[in-house]
Image: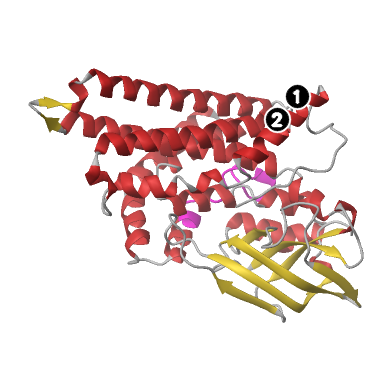
Amino acid sequence: MESNAFFALQHEVEDFVEGPAVDMGLGLENGSIGPMSVWDELKRRGYLRLAAPESLGGLGLSMGQYLTLLEKFSAMHGSMRMIVHVMNGIWRPVHSHASFAQVERFVKPLIQGEHIITFTLTEPNAGTGSDIKTKAYRDGNDYVLNGEKWLITFADVADYFLLFARLAGSAGSGGTLALLVDRDSPGLDIELMPASMGLSGTGHGHLRLTECRVPVVNRLGDEGEGLDVAFHGFLDPSRLGIGMTTVGLAQRALDLAIERAKTRVTFGKSLAQRATIRERLAEMATDVEAARQLCLWAARRWDEGCLLPEDASKAKLYGSEMLQRVTDRALQIFGGIGYFHGYEIERIYRDARAQRFEEGTAEVQKAVIGRALVAGGSAQEAKQDPVPVVTY
């Protein structure tokens, strides 16, 4: 996008985040509005198609431009930033192996927000990779699925589940399938899971598949390419996006902590006048800026076509751990009152815990980075089994 148009879009997003999004976030938190109201508003404003190419109906932002906006969005309620982040990335794995007919049927409507597709990989009794246990066998023009998936974000509103299974009798990544499973498929039972610590308004589902029939025409790519669909063009930009979401939320926590330090008076002095508090704020600000620059560096590498898996993992690893430090310190500056419902810092503290798990824990990111270091090159080139990935 040209600089003038992007500058205008940036201001539009800032006005939304500081205005209507505040009331919408409060509504999600207290249950006075439903999640589809949020989806509809974000769709109406075009915020669900920022990163997709113009040829598919998106706005065609560069990764650097998109992350700049994502930082702003991430100051919003956690469920709202998750919608923006996921919907601006889920088109990539769907599109990566889609036929022309599937692009028209699934990809373009997804980018326009006409239907919702959610990533469906995680299982209760497996790591999230080549050890998936959900089985499939072919019966004429259908695949028949048996197994379980859980922690599936947006299971309450999704129209299709981008679901990964393996052919019965196969082992390793070579027997995997990627299927778009309609939520009304016979044999699919969707049970909503208990509410999570944060991200109020986001539903997570436990899917049980019992002789669930899915048309073969809903398969993306060939048999054996399931995990390639899962990770092709999705994991690295998504990890990079999660890194920047930590920056946006941490910056908001820092801003609130600064405001609190200026206005809270104890023993005749504001907290901001105390050297210990100023030092703590300085540490927080440095931490946030370091994470921001690491993400922007990785974004430049993506836009130049040379991002490596370990680059995205570095951004996600540092950002998620930085966010925990900054929100801990912000809550400490607020004192006991910040622990109570109704204070934004309390909600931020809860929402911030989700990014520890999205797109893989710290241990997973370290495994990706460490593999590249030991291999003497990129993790992409290492001749080993894929590192397990926990997408949520």
Q: Residues within 10 Å of mark 2 (few under 14, many from 20)?
A: many
Q: For the residue marked with disc 2, what is the amino acid?
A: Ile
- The residue positioned 35% from the left and 56% from the top of the image is 24
- Can you identify the residue that label 2 sits on? 369
Residue 20 on image: x %, y %: 33, 51
Query: Residue 251's quadrant in the figure?
Result: top left
Give the magenta range: 42-60
Q: Is residue 346 left or right of residue 208?
A: left
Query: Principal SS element in the magenta part?
Result: loop
Which quadrant holds residue 242? top right
At 49% across and 38% down in the image, what residue appears? Answer: 246
Element under disc 1: helix
Q: In the displayed orientation, state which residue is furthest to the bottom.
A: 186
Image x and y of residue 77, in percent: 40, 50
Q: Between residues 45 and 183, which one lies in front from this camera angle?
A: 183
Instruction: Point out the image quarter for the N terminus.
Output: top right
Which numbered marker is on residue 373?
1
Residue 5 in view: no
Is 73 magenta? The answer is no
Question: Is residue 217 depicted above or below 354 in this figure?
Answer: below
